[in-house]
Amino acid sequence: MDQAETLRNIIKLQNQRTVTNARVITVTSGKGGVGKSNTSINLALQFQKMGKKVIILDADFGLANVEVMFGVIPKYNMGDLIFNGMDIKDIITEGPEGVGFISGGSGIAKLVNLDKDQVKNLVGKLSQLEEFADVIIIDTGAGISPAVMEFILASPETVLVTTPEPTSITDSYALLKALSMTDSYDSYVNKVKMLANRVSNEKEGRNLYEKLNSVVTKFLNIKMEYLGHVVYDDNMTKAVMSQKPVTIMYPHSPASRCYENIVSTLETGHAVSQNAGVRSFFRNVFSRKMKNGD
């Protein structure tokens, strides 16, 4: 093979490696204990079954639910990316079925203290996730906190996990109220999709959505969509106790079929051209620091 042919092959390979924008989905909840992290994991696994490459960013730095449910202890976390000079590929841990995940660790908590140069460096590194994933799922902390709000405001798609418990409904409303009072919130840019979790059937899921959406529509400037429901399933409890996702341990269970339906709904009508990409997402997360340099 002559030098010119070698060069042509290199250029051809580079053209084939054109990276498209990854889809970023943030999963959040108004309170803990409603199945938020379970939702993140099982949605990720369903996307993976569809042939997507998926990475979960565990941004719930207080609990590390994702690694517990995967039964895998990560060697590195976001702190190593920020402070120890590691590359993004070094801190991705492989979970079940090839789903990657990044542990936030103490690094997520320290994000607010980064200066402008550190933020730019971090955004550059996180942007490389585009090369490793088609879908990136952000598993936030529960409730209303500055970190949670920043992730939601930066995300074009947010899945709000809510259960029929009165406290879950009121806490979901409180989160949406805080979101609506934020100057940078845009209902056309930041899509909120409610997932009704631990309901008896589709009808109860719809009723839960209608109950919450009626007060949201009346009092808040937020457009909320209904994403779907996940039924209460004893198999879910068994899977959690075994530190295995229900979609792996009981792939034909009622809950697993619900997750499959939800991912199908997320995929229906979604165009790749709608993906803003990872760089855009993280630039939005740190937008004020990028602008002010404080």
Image (tube, helix red, strand yellow):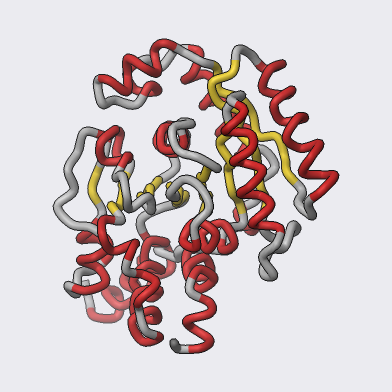
Rendered location of residue 233, percent (x, y): 47, 13
In screen coordinates, is 38 left or right of 199? left
In the picture, residue 14 is in which quadrant? bottom left
- Depth check, front residue: 245 or 134: 245
- Depth check, front residue: 170 or 270: 170
Residue at the extreme left of the image, as rendered: 75
State the quadrant of the C terminus.
bottom left
State the quadrant of the N terminus.
bottom left
In screen coordinates, is 145 left or right of 110? right
In screen coordinates, is 73 left or right of 133? left
Identified at 66% across, 47% down, the residue is 192
Looking at the image, residue 181 lies above or below residue 27: below
In the picture, residue 169 is in which quadrant? top right
Residue at the extreme right of the image, as rendered: 218
Identified at 69% across, 70% down, the residue is 183
Rendered location of residue 36, percent (x, y): 46, 37
Rendered location of residue 72, percent (x, y): 19, 38
Number of marks present in the image shown = 0
Identified at 38% across, 61% down, the residue is 129
Looking at the image, residue 122 lies above or below residue 281: below
- Depth check, front residue: 211 or 78: 211
Rendered location of residue 261, percent (x, y): 58, 25
Looking at the image, residue 137 lies above or below residue 14: above
Identified at 45% across, 48% down, the residue is 137
Looking at the image, residue 62 lies above or below residue 225: below
